[in-house]
Amino acid sequence: MLLGRWVQKHFSRLFWLLAVVAVVVVVQIILGSSSMPRQHILAEMGYDFTVMTADIDEKAIRKDKPEELVTALAEAKVVVHEGRIREKPSSKDEARNFIEGYSGGRAEVVGSVLVTNLKTGRREAGWERAEVYFYDIPAEVVQSLIDEGITLNVAGGLMLEHPLTSPIIKEVIGTADTIMGLPKSLTERLIQEALTRPSSEACRNPA
């Protein structure tokens, strides 16, 4: 009798708790990029993930507009300087030309995110951009960056989060995570859309 009264009194609360437990879903994420900054950002967002990259020749994929190019490359970012798309430098000389060209000027970073729900086939994609304004870049800083060799591994030849780069940045319009290659707000939105919307393909720029 007492048990029956207790169950009746607390039935709605028990039902609510069971309902909450029922909707908990474990999301398994595969990051298709070996970029350490992207891995760091995704970890900051609280996701557990596995890294799995494809052997793709990015130079073989060509588009005129930076937004179209990064979407075609799916998980890439490119730098635009004076209207020209700058990807990873092909040599130290090209990297030097890139970096010296930023001195006292500006560059634009365009990055894309593509999320695929492997269970439903739903694909959601979008892109974001940020602008970076530079102080004059001393010759010794350019040389140090070239000597390190890291300039050959990043779009535009310049890793903006590098300790040598930070002091030469005058202003950033946009978010740091966009510059690092994985915009948090865009990524989170696309993940949720890929999980909740019906199966189909979509590519769109962020609202």
Image: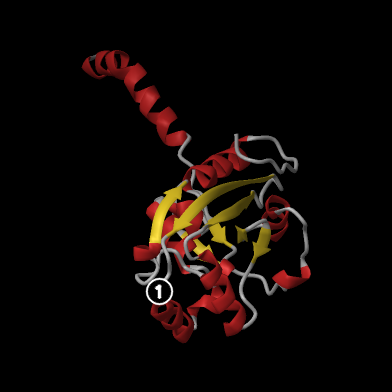
The answer to whether residue 157 of the structure is visible from this angle is: no
Looking at the image, which residue sits at the far bottom? 147
Left or right: 103 as drawn, with respect to 85 = left
Quarter containing the C terminus: top right
Q: Is residue 90 above or below residue 49?
A: below
Frontmost residue, 204 versus 130? 130
Q: Residues within 10 Å of mark 1 (few under 14, many from 20)?
A: few
Task: Read off the residue under disc 1.
Answer: 138
| Residue found 73% across the figure and 57% down from its top | 72
Quarter containing the N terminus: top left
Frontmost residue, 111 versus 10? 111
| Residue found 55% across the figure and 75% down from its top | 153
Mark 1: which amino acid?
Pro
Left or right: 2 as drawn, with respect to 40 = left
* Coordinates of residue 35 in the picture (x, y in percent): 51, 68
* Coordinates of residue 15 in the picture (x, y in percent): 39, 23
Q: Is residue 198 above or below residue 56?
A: above
Q: Is residue 105 above or below residue 165?
A: above
* Coordinates of residue 19 in the picture (x, y in percent): 44, 28
| Residue found 48% across the figure and 54% down from its top | 132
* Coordinates of residue 98 in the picture (x, y in percent): 57, 71
Q: Is residue 7 above or below residue 57?
A: above
Left or right: 201 as drawn, with respect to 171 = right
SS at badge 1: loop
| Residue found 40% across the figure and 74% down from its top | 138
